[in-house]
Image: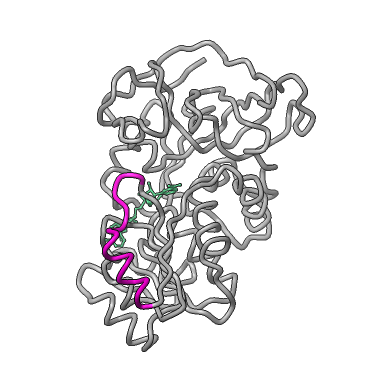
Amino acid sequence: MRAMAFCAFGGPEVLAPVALPVPEPGPGHVRVAVNHASANPADAKTCRGLLARYITCNFPFVPGFDLAGTVDAVGPGVTQWAVGDAVFGTSRVGQGANGSFAQYTLADVAMLAPLPAGISSAQAACLPTAGTTALGGLTDVGRLCAGQTVLINGGAGGVGSIAIQIANHLGARVLATCSVHNIRHVMDLGADLAIDYRTGDVVAAVRAQCSDGVDLVLDAVGQGTLSPQADRLVRRGGAFVAIETLICEPDPADVARAGAAGVRVVSNMVAIDRLPDQLRRLGDLAAQGVVCAPVHAIIPLRDLGKALRMIETGHTRGKIAISVAG
Ligand SMILES: NC(=O)c1ccc[n+]([C@@H]2O[C@H](COP(=O)([O-])OP(=O)(O)OC[C@H]3O[C@@H](n4cnc5c(N)ncnc54)[C@H](OP(=O)(O)O)[C@@H]3O)[C@@H](O)[C@H]2O)c1
């Protein structure tokens, strides 16, 4: 089968086309014929070896978390899925297996959900990692309720673009940070206010809306962009949910200061135990038309390096889908 793999850690240039044997599903696994994957910052980090303490890469290693495709074979004892089922979800790359930047990949039965009705394969492939992180951060961890105000830091990116739509659907007032050229994008997704973080004072803009601070911040940027101001952005009793970048987490001193101000600072990442439920909830929201992944570009598998270079700028809009079958 065709795949994109790397044989040494490095930048996107280490990715090269390879021919590999089609993987055989073991107990509890299915094989998916991948139509589309999508590019995530975690894929670039995997290539650079920055996630080596989480993922053991045996070379040649095929990265790729997200997928949409068709069940092609099922392992012994698998009854949940049948050959021909259209699915979306995540590969076993987090367990050190080859991922979804390949014609075929393996997935755990629980890490797939039915392809949402009316959603394209490219759209569905853009949902799993960004969407479950947004959904989990806002609901399971952030406990966002109707009538509350949420600030989404990084509103134009993969996680942020989906989070705006979910928060809007939950009946929250949505503030979102972005660059000036992305203001229209975040407003079209349902933000009530876009804050240009490059030229404006985010704390002042938030305080102008909510004098005591917002109920919740979902920080999809990290790198210390907002966490030092958590105590001034969030009201007493509220929460600052930091999406784990896995390379730079909030400074413990900032967390302690926020705690002293009555602000709960919690981290959020894709959690294996919550993922099956989150994927199904996300699929339902997508099928209802509540959530759509804004697909900024569809790039062929052979140009995966180009997609990861775009991701590494830190300024892509929405999501980049990877066309595998086409
Ligand atoms: N641990 C996990 O399970 C998990 C899961 C998902 C994501 N993550 C992490 O969460 C982060 C975000 O993921 P993603 O998929 O949303 O990334 P992404 O799509 O690459 O995010 C790019 C966006 O970030 C915005 N941005 C960059 N700097 C900003 C700043 N200072 N303030 C506001 N916005 C800024 C850019 O908007 P402008 O161009 O307008 O500046 C751009 O649209 C990544 O570090 C990723 O690895 C972790």
Above-or-below relation of 147 to 277: below
In which image quadrant can residue 157 be found?
bottom left
Residue 186 in view of the camera? no
Is 95 inside the magenta-drawn segment? no
**Lateral position of residue 310 relative to residue 174, left or right:** left
**Lateral position of residue 112 relative to residue 318, left or right:** right
How far across and down, in percent of the image, does residue 87 sit? 66, 38
Above-or-below relation of 73 to 34: above
How far across and down, in percent of the image, does residue 152 sit? 41, 67
Q: Nearer the viewer, residue 66 or 276?
A: 276
**Lateral position of residue 150 relative to residue 287, left or right:** left
Q: Nearer the viewer, residue 217 or 35?
A: 217
In which image quadrant can residue 223 be found?
bottom left
How far across and down, in percent of the image, does residue 22 sit? 57, 14
Question: Which residue: 32% across, 67% down?
Answer: 256
How far across and down, in percent of the image, does residue 164 sit? 48, 66
Residue 262 in view of the camera? yes
**What colouring style does the render use?**
one colour
Is 255 inside the magenta-drawn segment? yes
Range covered by the magenta-colored residues: 246-261
